Amino acid sequence: MKPGSLLPCAALVLFLGAWEAAVWLWGIPRFLLPPPSAIVQAFADDPRALARALETTASAALLGFAASAALGVASAILLSSSRLLERAFYPYTVFLQTVPIIAIAPLLVIWFGPGLRAVTVSALIVSIFPVIANTLAGIRSVDPALRDLFKLYRASRAATLLQLELPGALPQLFTGLRVAAGLAVIGTIVGEFVAGFGEDDAGLGIRILSAARQTQTAQIFACVALAALLGLALSSAVGALGARLTRHWHAAEKSDRA
Amino acid sequence: MVSRRPGVSVRARGLRRVFPGGVEAVGGVDLEIGEGAFVALLGPSGCGKSTLLRMIAGLDAPSAGSIRLVGDGAREALAYVFQDAHLLPWRSVEENVALPLELRGVPGAERRQLARHAIAEVGLADAGGRYPAELSGGMRMRVSLARAIVTRPRLLLLDEPFAALDEITRQRLDDQLRALHQVLGMTVLFVTHSIAEAVYLADRAIVLSSRPARIVLDRTIELPRERSSSIRAEPRFARELGELLRGLEEGEG
């Protein structure tokens, strides 16, 4: 374990301990606030079902994220190809960010039917804006001198895109993807609330709803914890990939020889 | 390996550049630069000398007047070095230097060979696999120079390329550039605001006035072709400095 992660871990242990103690000390009813030990128990009661729920939600979130990455980058490339296009359409991408997904989720059910497709589209809508905005900003911020250089050597549009604009936009692109990865999980859970599958391969969202109906509060916490971990894992993985791809940008040490 | 091809000559007539908003950067410049010449364009900061160079490179269009580059395929035969190195941080030194060849569709093996050769020519032979962020400012500028000469340009345009470097490094790169000019024989147009650098490097110095840039002095530098830094201490070096300085002061007024 890295030394830097020791402190947050200690803080977590302290927090969970205080939570456990508080519930016992003040006799808080379990349906209001279950102690951490009860949440662990909920995991232990039916690990299979929770694992299946996690799997369902994770695949929908991954699918939604992949779609949002692909469509987001493609849209940004398209918008960056002409000022006119950008001025005409970019304002509407902001709409994607402000639209309350919970309000249009029922629409998605009507269009795509309940199930994976509607859930994935919900994840896509929630997560695509940061990808478009950051990729576009990245492409726009490419060094003008390098643009001149490519112009000087008569680089084709494709070469300029592939050798200059996209690699140049990578750091910002990955900032967008990281945010999108977390948002995709949120979009998936919301999508499942409205358009989730039946009981067999229910995702975390569905399990949260049914646990809520039966006031199995510990069960809700268990699902929430899994959803949070899923979002964290996804965005860390994307962040690590981004760091790997841009590892040459910043040197660990600089030589002073001329 | 080294092919000495004739340089490209430059002819500009009544060149003007007025930016949108009415600022006149270049105001009526006539210029005749013979092939193989090493010419310094000297002028105060912000006088429009970079704009002049950009127009010659075809990166900016004149508002009036004309530029002709004379020589076979002259437009394809030019290279440009910017004020900073401007390398692609995700590419190794060798890949950076190979970029112009890549954009022109030179096949991989040949490209790598030419890139390695150019890297050796600027004295960085063993740095090909390193990345720009690992290099010092002087080394980055050398890579930038290697990237410019890798296509064997016949017109090399440099826009205050060494201005940000320390004195020693700058001196070394000046020597390197002169040596490359001797070997490759291309026409060189070198923009600078340093009088000493202009005298040391160039065979001819053109002094520009403050904005809008006009030519106030066009002088052949009377120094031998072979120069080393000891020449800076000689009276004839000082005389050239004095002449150019007088020109600059005239242009300010």
Image (cartoon, coloured by chain):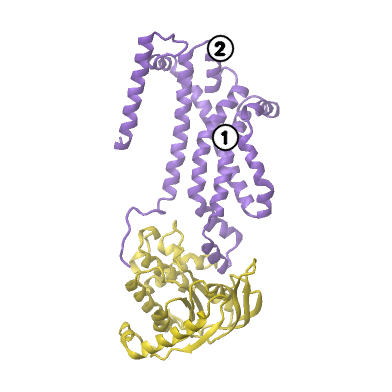
Q: Which chain is yellow?
A: B
Residue type, mark 1 in image: Gly
Q: Tag 1's secondary structure?
A: helix
Q: Are labels 2 and 1 on one chain?
A: yes
Can you give x and y, in whole percent of width and height, for residue A145 in the image? 52, 64
Relative height, residue A109 to residue B97 (above, below):
above
Can you give x and y, in whole percent of width and height, for residue A177 in the image? 51, 41
Q: In which quarter of the image is the N terminus of chain A?
A: top left
Residue B38 in sight in this render: no
Relative height, residue A95 to residue B175 (above, below):
above
In this view, the residue in front, B186 or A117, is B186
Disc 2 designates what residue?
Answer: A213
Q: Mark 2 lies on which chain?
A: A
Residue visible at 44% across and 38% down in the picture: A237
Left or right of A111, for residue B45: left
Mark 2, residues whose alpha carbon is within 10 Å: few (<14), some, or many (≥20)? Answer: few
Q: Are marks 2 and 1 in contact (CB under 8 Å)?
A: no
Q: In which quarter of the image is the C terminus of chain A?
A: bottom left
Q: Distance between the residues labelled 2 and 1?
A: 28 Å
Can you give x and y, in whole percent of width and height, for residue B243 in the image? 43, 88
Residue sitting at the far front: B253
Left or right of A113, for residue A166: left
Left or right of B26, for residue B36: left
Residue visible at 55% across and 74% down in the picture: B48
Q: Mark 1 lies on which chain?
A: A
Residue type, mark 2 in image: Arg
The numbered disc on residue A18 is none
The numbered disc on residue A64 is 1
Count of number-bearing discs: 2
Q: Which hue is chain A drawn in? A: purple
Can you give x and y, in whole percent of width and height, for residue B31 in the image? 57, 84
